[in-house]
Image (cartoon, rainbow, N blue to C red):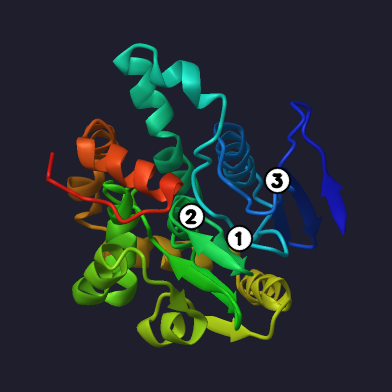
Amino acid sequence: MIQMEKESGWRCVKIEKSGRVAVVRFDRKDGVNALSLRAMRELTEAAEWMRADHDIYAVALVGSDKGFSAGRDLKDPEMDPRRDGPLLNCRWAAGAGARLCKAWADLEQYTTCNIEGFAIGGGLALAVSVDYRAISETAHLRAPEAALGLSMSWGSVPRIVNLVGPARAKQILIHANKSIEADQALAWGLVEEITPEDESAAAAIHAAELAAEIPPVAARMIKRTVDAYANALADSVVHMDTDQVLLAESGADHLEAVDAFLAKRAPTFTGA
């Protein structure tokens, strides 16, 4: 296993190469692997770096032992000046997650990820941006955005619909406080494999190794054709999802949801 270093000094991401497989290890060591702007930049840069490496045939994205990711870091201090700045700056910062997920979805190599503990919100959006998901039997998935008065974004809605169909997608996204356990996620097609606890990383790497055994040009052409068919109308749907988030964040229901969450009380929504 060869560890690849990057001159700019990533803090959250490490890339290891073993033969034709790259293992991307994402661990902020914060207990929840929250997606700060820095973490999103590093993961985006990692995807862009690997896309240009033609010696890499498959990629495994491995989260921490405690959890894949709890989603966007709501306490990220880097977001504060951007929220108070010009709309153009706010919009760019709000689009970081969409750029991250697109970078991973656009990789020509076959991609996998593992889910220990949880994949929540933006963590789920990132997980559905790869080709294959292995989940621990004790892990769960959740999309809490609607319960917080927000729309699901980062280009994830068409990807979720492609995996589970429209009815299940609505259930996942609108029943926002309900966790999806591993066996349910597998039955719905949201993940491809269940493993014993602490073995999902090995399963994700093994799936990448299997893909790396296939002639790379054929594998990339197949992936591109499948994605082109599955996502033929995706751009017409997701081009505005960053703007939807900015709009929803300005509403009273979002502020009420966050206040109620912090105060541990039931929220009262008015549609404002």
Displayed quadrant of residue 136: bottom right
* Front position in the image: 149 or 188: 149
For label 1, the residue is 68
For label 3, the residue is 28
Say whether marks 3 and 2 touch (CB < 8 Å). no
Question: Vertical placement of 88 versus 43: above or below?
Answer: above
Residue 262 location (% of width, % of height): 45, 45
Q: Residues within 10 Å of mark 1 (few under 14, many from 20)?
A: many
Amino acid type of disc 2?
Answer: Leu
For label 2, the residue is 126
Residue 248 location (% of width, % of height): 23, 38
Q: Residues within 10 Å of mark 2 (few under 14, many from 20)?
A: many
- Tag 2 secondary structure: helix
Amino acid type of disc 1?
Answer: Phe
**Image point 57% across, 34% down: which residue?**
41
Disc with the residue nearer the chain's start (3 vs 1): 3
